[in-house]
Image: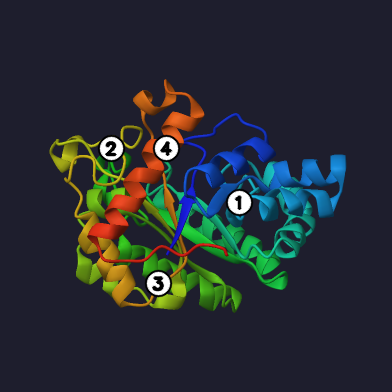
Amino acid sequence: MLPTLHQVTAGGGLSLPDYVALAGRHGFHGVEFSIQAVAQSVDAIGFPATAAIFESHKVLPASFGLPVEWRKDEETFARDLEALPALAKLAQDLDCSRCCTWVLPDSGEPVEEYASRSSRRLVEVARVLQSEGVRLGLEFLGPQHFRKNPDNVWFYDIPGAVHVVAQMSQMGELENLGLLVDAWHWYTSGGTTMDLASIPIEQIIHVHINDAPDLPVADQVDSVRLLPGESGVIDIVGFLKTLDAIGYDGPLAVETFSAELKTLAPDEAAARAGAAVSKVLSMAGIEPLHLQ
């Protein structure tokens, strides 16, 4: 698995060159990144110089956030969708074939309406990405505070997400749809290692790792997380060993929403995150991938 840095953990607000350099200094061989930031860099200094930012630090552009606002009005969605082909091609030019977006289980509107509109839009997005060889991972969100009305929930766990991916894939005749599996959402959704092992390996597009405070599952809040292995509440070793057993060898991004980490200098936050990832991989008996 490829240790990957996420900007919410360390490096948020840094320029693209500084963020990639930060990752490289602290044992990360991949980064989650903004494809819009890459496009701005290409406009400013050209593609070869932008690609060299990653190559010079031996850091892969592992995964980018979906640059399409599909949750709001139709006009905004159509505008962003129109710009997507060029951005998807740019990602492919960088040899990045993974893109992800999160999906709320409950938008507050009737679930049938929410699911129908969202499915249509995400299928349109996936078609564009597929034409450029990019896969789309949907992230299910597990905590109970996103499920205030149990009768109005689309999906929030692995079985539900796998089912929705199958529906959308059939609807759009797609082969590039799958999941972003986050350890924190797996834990808060009540997931088991058997659930994890049930995901077809080709559908695991990206993985996030982290830990949770020592609180009841019902009290866990999305914006409060710990570095992987910090509390031991999440069975991160079981999580990683299961992924390894089914053959996942892709990016492993540390995504930790932490008020404490935000108070630290980027290098200190990245160093702590890098050490945490290295520790849990070692505990799971997994050798991290890296660029030579």
- Precedes in sequence: disc 3 or disc 2: 2
Of the image marks 4 and 1, the number of the one nearer the N terminus:
1
Q: Residue at x 27, y 39 (%)?
A: 148
> Mark 4: which secondary structure?
helix
Which kind of residue does numbered mark 1 sit on?
Answer: Leu
Q: Which residue is mark 4?
A: 271
Quadrant of the snapshot with the N terminus:
bottom left
Q: Secondary structure at mark 2?
A: helix
Q: Is residue 241 visible?
A: yes
Q: CA distance from mark 2 to mark 4?
A: 32 Å
Can you tell which quarter of the image residue 200 is in? Answer: bottom left
Foreground pick, 74 / 13: 13
Q: Which amino acid is tagged 3?
A: Tyr
Real-space CA distance between mark 4 and mark 3, rounded to the nearest whole angstrom? 25 Å
Residue named by callout 1 = 66
Q: Front-most of 284 and 25? A: 25
Q: In the rendered structure, which amino acid carries the disc numbered 2? A: His
Residue at image mark 3: 248
The disc, 2 or 1, on the residue closer to the chain's N-terminal end is 1
Residue 60 at what x, y percent from top left? 60, 57
Residue lying farthest to the top in this orientation: 263
- SS at circle 1: loop
- Foreground mark, 4 or 1, reads 4
**Distance from Cα at disc 3 to Cα at disc 2:** 30 Å
Dot 3 or dot 1: first in sequence order is 1
Q: Residues within 10 Å of mark 1 (few under 14, many from 20)?
A: many
In this view of the protein, can residue 9 be seen by the observer? no
Which residue is labeled 2 in the image?
145
Q: Give the Cα separation between the discs numbered 4 and 1.
A: 27 Å
Instruction: Tell me the residue at 40%/72% (across/down).
Output: 248
